[in-house]
Image (tube, helix red, strand yellow):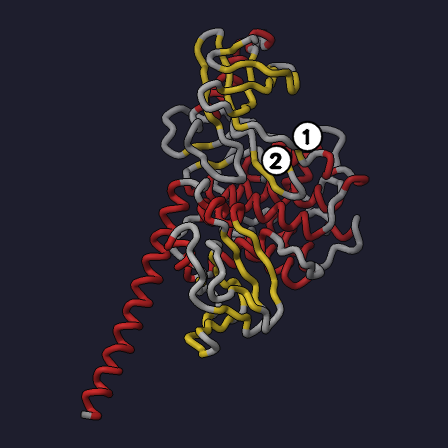
Amino acid sequence: MEKIGKYEIVKVLGRGATSTVYLALDPFNQQQVALKVFNLSVLHDSSRAKAFRKLLLTEASLAGKLSHPHIVKIVDAVMEGEENYMVMEYVEGETLEKFAEVDHLMDLGHIAEIIYKCCKALEYAQYQGVIHRDIKPANILIFGENDIKISDFGAAVIDNQQSTQVSGVGSPAYMSPEQIKELPLTHQTDIYSLGVTMYRLLTGKLPYEAANSYSMIYQIMNLEPQPPSTFRPEIPPELDAIVLRAMSKDLTKRYQTWDEFARELVAFISNNVPQHKEIFDTEKFDTLRDLAFFKNFSDVELWEVLRISEWAKVDKEQTLLRDGDVGQHFFVIAEGSVRVLKLGRLLSLLHRGDCFGEMAYLAGKEARRSTDVISKTEVTLIDIDPEVLARASANCRYQFGEAFLGILVKRLSMANTRISRLLKDHGDEE
C-alpha cells in the first residue's frame, strides 16, 4: 500500500488544480483521515506560489487548535520543501453547494438550523482568535440530515500571528464591504459572509448578480439586496429581517455578536417552524445552555452532550422509572415536572434542570431503582446511556462528575436540614 509520511493511502477522493485529496489510514489509531497533498510546482508565477504557500501555512498552524464538533479538525500538517500535505478528519458528506441551487433548496427550518450551527462554530473560532474570511457554501460540509462542519481556514486571520496576512483572498460574492476595502477585520466580516450564504441557501441566488468581479464589488459597496422573499414567497418577514441584518453594510446595524445572530435564529425556529416530534438541534443546544445541570459545561462539551443523549417528549402521568427495576440510564428534565414516590408516598417534585436516576448509575451495574418516578406534566427528558457516556471525552465526563457531586451535596444538605428539624421537634415534645 502506498504511503505518504506515516499515512497509508486508501483511494483518491478528489483532484484539483493544486492538490489531490486522498482517503488515508492513520496506522497508529486505525482512523480514517482525509490527506490533502499540495503540488506547488503548477504555480509557475513565483509570487502566486509564495502567497498560496502562506495560505497553506496559515491553515497548517491551526493543527490541533480548533476542536469543535462543527469545524473540520486539522490533525497534522507537513510543509517542508517538496513535501506539502495536510491531514484532516475525514467527513463522509458533501458541501452545501448543491443545496444552494434552485432545484435542491432545503426547507426553511433546516436552513435556519444549519446557519445556527455555523454561528456557534464561528463564535468558538472567534474566541480562539480566528476569523475565517472565506465563508461560503463550498466551505461548509453537510453530513447526515443537517449536521455540518466548516472547513478551509487557509484565508483566516489569526490573532497574535507574527506574519502578515495575504490580502485579496476570499470569494468576491461573499466578501463584506470592509473586506473588499481591505480594512481591519473582525468577526463581523464572517457574519456578513454567513448572511450571504444563508441568502443563497434560501433562494438559490446570490444577493448580487454580476457578469464580472468589478460589477459584483460595485454592487456590494453601493446597492441594497432584494429581500430573499422576493425569490421565494414563503419566506416570512422575520427570516428576511435576519438575513438582511446579517448583511448590513453598516457595522453598527449588523449583528454585533454571534450569539445575537444565533438567538434570532432560535426565535424564528420556535415561532415559525411547525412543531414535529423531532426536536431540532438548535432547540436542544439552547435548552442545554439554560439548564442548571449543565451550567459549567463549555459550548463544545454541550455539543458533545447533544450527540450522546436521546431526547423524548412524554405525556403526563406516565411511569418513567419503577422501584426495583434494574437500569443505569439517568435523565435530566429539559421541560416539565416529575413526581418521585416511595411505596406510593410523595418524596419530592423535580422540575426543569433537575436530574433523576443518577443514583443507580453511580452505584454501578446491576443496581436497582429505589423509587418510582412519574411525569406530573408533559415532560421533555434528556436520556443519558452510561455506556455511551463512557466513550465521551474526558472533559465531558469530568463535567458530569462535577454536576453529580453538586447534586449530592445539595441533597445531603437538605437531608441534614430535615433531620435537624425532626430532632428539634422531638426535643420540643419532650
Q: Tell me what residue is drawn at x 49 percent, y 42 percent.
A: 187
Disc 2 to disc 1: CB gap under 8 Å: no
Q: Nearer the viewer, mark 2 or mark 1?
A: 2
Image quadrant where residue 412 sits? bottom left
- Classify the position of the C terminus by image quarter: bottom left
Residue 134: percent from the left, percent from the top? 57, 33
Q: Earlier in the sequence, mark 2 or mark 1?
A: 2
Residue at the spot of label 1: 214
Residue 270: percent from the left, percent from the top? 63, 61
The amino acid type found where label 1 is placed reads Tyr
Q: Residue furthest bottom?
A: 429
Residue at the spot of label 2: 140
Q: Is residue 410 above or below residue 111?
A: below
Residue 259: percent from the left, percent from the top? 50, 53
| Element marked by disc 1 | helix
Q: Is residue 211 above or below residue 226?
A: above
Q: Residues within 10 Å of mark 2 (few under 14, many from 20)?
A: many
In this orientation, which residue lies closer to the viewer: 185 or 384? Answer: 384
